[in-house]
Image: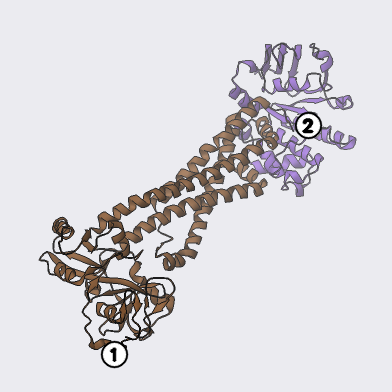
Amino acid sequence: MSEALIELRNLTFGWTRNRVDLEIAALDIARGERVFVRGASGSGKSTLLSLLAGVNVPRSGTLRVLGQALGSLSGTARDRFRAEHIGYVFQQFNLLPYLSARDNVVLGLNFSRERATRVANRKAMADELLQRLGLDARHIGALASELSVGQQQRVAAARALIGAPELIIADEPTSALDADTRDQFLSLLIDASTAAGSAVLFVSHDSGLRAHFDTTLDLHTLNRARVA
Amino acid sequence: MLLKIARSSLYNRRISALLTLLTIAISVALLLAVERVRVETRNSFSNTIAGIDLIVGARTGPVQLLLYSVFRIGDATNNIRYATYEEIAKHPQVAFAIPISLGDSHRGFRVIGTTADYFEHFRFGDKRKLEFAAGEPFADLYDAVVGAEVARALGYTLGQQIVVAHGTGRVDITRHDDKPFRIVGILARTGTPVDRSVHVSLQAIEAIHIDWQSGARLPGRAVDAETARTMDLQPKAVTAVFVGLKSRVAAFSIQRQVNDFRGEPLLAIMPGITLAQLWSLIGVAENALRLVAACVVIAGILGMITALVTTLNERRREMAILRSLGARPWQIGLLLVIEAAVLTALGATVGVIVLLLGMVALAPWLASAYGIFIQPFAMGVPELILVGAVVVFGILAGLVPALMAYSRSLSDGLSIRV
C-alpha cells in the first residue's frame, strides 16, 4: 500500500464552465500527517475540500486519495469512498439536533462498513472518544440541541474519528470557540487522531493554530487561480 | 438506522407531524365509515325479509311497494280488497299468504294489522323465525305485540296499555284513545324494521276505525270498545300480502297472474329483484359519497406532502450532514419515503381506531333512529384493502419530497446552506 494519502497533480476546477476557481500544481499529504491549510474565505478553501471529499471531481489533472483516482469513480462510489475513509468536521451546527451526543457519534458508522468493522462495541467506543475529547459523561446521553457550541464541536470531532478513518478533514472547526477552548480542543483532536492513526487536514484562516501541525500550506500561494 | 433517524426527526417535528397524522386519520376514518355504512345498510335491507317469494299490493312502483310494505318507509297510496287477499291465499300454488294493513302508528312506531300467520311464516336474515322475548301472539281483539326496539325505547312491559294513533307521523295527533290495547307479547330483537313495529290483528284495525270515515271520526256516532266487539269486524281491505309459494319455480307465472288480475289493479314483486333495482338507484348516491371520501383522503395526503416539502428547506443542513457521513442521495430520498410511510401508516391506524370507537359509540343511536344495525368489529378484507391502498398511495406520494431531497442533496453536496 502506498505511503501517500493524498496525491494531487495539475488540478483545475471551476464551479461554472468559463471560470477557474482552483488551480493547484501539486499537493502531497502522507498517511498520518497533520497538515494545516491556511486560507481566507474566497481562497478556494471550500472548493478544495469538496474535491478532497469527493463531492466534486476535478475538471482536469489527477487527484488520488489512498491511491484511488477519485475522478474515475461514480458519484455513488465516491460517496461510499468518503464514508469509508474520510471523517469530516464542519465549522459548526453539524449535528443532528434530535439525536443524543452518543447517537450522533455512532451515526458516523452507519454508512461505512469498513469503519464499522473496526469498532467492536459502538456505544463504548463513542463514549470513550467523547470522554477523550473532554465531554462530561453526563452530557453523553443529552440531545445535541441541548449542548453548548464547544460541546457540539467535540461531538462532531468524535463522530469524524470513530472507526479510525484514514483522513480527518476539519473545516474551520474552531471559529466559534474562544481562544482557550480552541487550543484545548485542538490538542485533544490531534491526540485522538494520532491514537487512531488518522491524518488531519485542518483548514482555518487563523494562522495562530499552525503550531499544532507538522506542515503548513497557504492556499493563497498554492491556488494559482485568481478569483475576483 | 434510517428508520431511527426518521423516527427521531419526526419526533423533533412532532406538532406538525401530529397534525398531519390526524388529517390522515380523519380522512381514513371517513373513508371507512362511508364504506361501513354502505355495507351495513345493504346488509340491513337484505336481512329484512327472507322466505317470501312475492309481495302483492295495489298497483304502484315496485320499489315503492317494497319500501312501504317491508321497510315501513313511506305510505301506501292504495289498499287492496280483502276478497282479493282471500283469492290469493287459496291459490293452489300458494303455501301461505300473510296480509298486512298499515296506516296507524304509536309514538312514531308503525302499527301493523296482520294475522297469526305473520308470527308463523315471516322470516328474516338467514331464514330465521320471529321469536318472542316475552309473552305470546295476540289472541284477544285488543291485544298487541311490540317489537324489541319499541319495548326498549318506550320501556314497555307485558300487560301495559297503549293507545294507537291515526296516521304515521312522528307525533300522535289524532288518537284512537277510546280503544286502548294491552301488550301481550314482546318480540326478540331481529335487527329489522320488525323491531320498530307494533302488531295487532286485522280485526283490531277494523274495530278502531269503525266509527271513522275518510280519516276522521264521525261526530255523534262514537262506538265504545266493548260495543265494537259485537259488531261486524270482517276486514274490508289490506295494504299488502306477503306470499310464500310451494315451489319457487312458479314465482314468475304467479307474478304474471297477479299482475293480470281482472278484479282490481294489482302489482306483484319478487323482493330480491326489486331490492336489486333499489340498489341501482342508491348506487349513484353511494358512489358520490365514496368519491367525496376518496377526495378527502387525497386532500389529507396532499397535506402531508405539503408538510414534508416545506420542511425540506429547514432540513437542508440535516441532509448535508448525512451526506458528509457518507449517506447516498438515494438514502436521503428513502428517508423521506420512510417518513411518509410512517405518517400514513400511523395515520391509518389511528383512523381505524377512531372509527371503531365512533361506531361503538354511535351504533345504538343508528339502530334506533335509522334501523341500521352496525357491527363495529366486522371489518374485513375490503376495509383492509382500502387501508392498504391509502398507505401505498401515501408512500407513492412520499416520492415527491423524496425526489426533491434527492436532487437537492446532489446539488448541495456538503455545503451547508442555512
* Front in this rendered view, residue B92 or A38: B92
| Residue A29, above or below B155 | above
Amino acid under label 2? Gln
Binning the other alpha carbons within 10 Å of mark 2 as few (below 14), some (14 to 19) or many (20 upward) gives some
Chain at tag 1:
B
Q: Quadrant of the C terminus of chain A?
A: top right
Q: Is residue A84 or residue B190 the one in the foreground? A: B190
A146 lies left or right of B273: right
Residue sticking out furthest to the left: B92
Residue, disc 1: B226
For the question of whether residue B70 can be seen, the reply is no
Which secondary structure lies at badge 2? loop
Name the residue: 10% across, 66% down. Answer: B92
Would you say B147 lies left or right of B232 here? right
Which percent across, then down, holds residue B157? 38, 83
Quarter in which the N terminus of chain A is drawn: top right
With B123 as the anchor, is A147 left or right in this view?
Answer: right
**Residue at the spot 12% in from the left edge and 66% down from the top edge:** B91
Measuring from the top left, give residue B9's x and y in whole percent: 65, 43
As helix, strand or loop, the secondary structure at mark 1 comes to: helix
Q: Nearer the viewer, mark 2 or mark 1?
A: 1
Tell me the amino acid under the disc marked 1: Glu
Residue behind mark 2: A91
Any idea which chain is the brown one in this picture? B
As drawn, the residue found furthest toward the bottom would be B226
Left or right of B116 on screen, residue B161: right
Say if B232 sits above or below B15 in the image: below
Palette colour of chain A: purple
The picture quadrant where one finds residue A165 is: top right
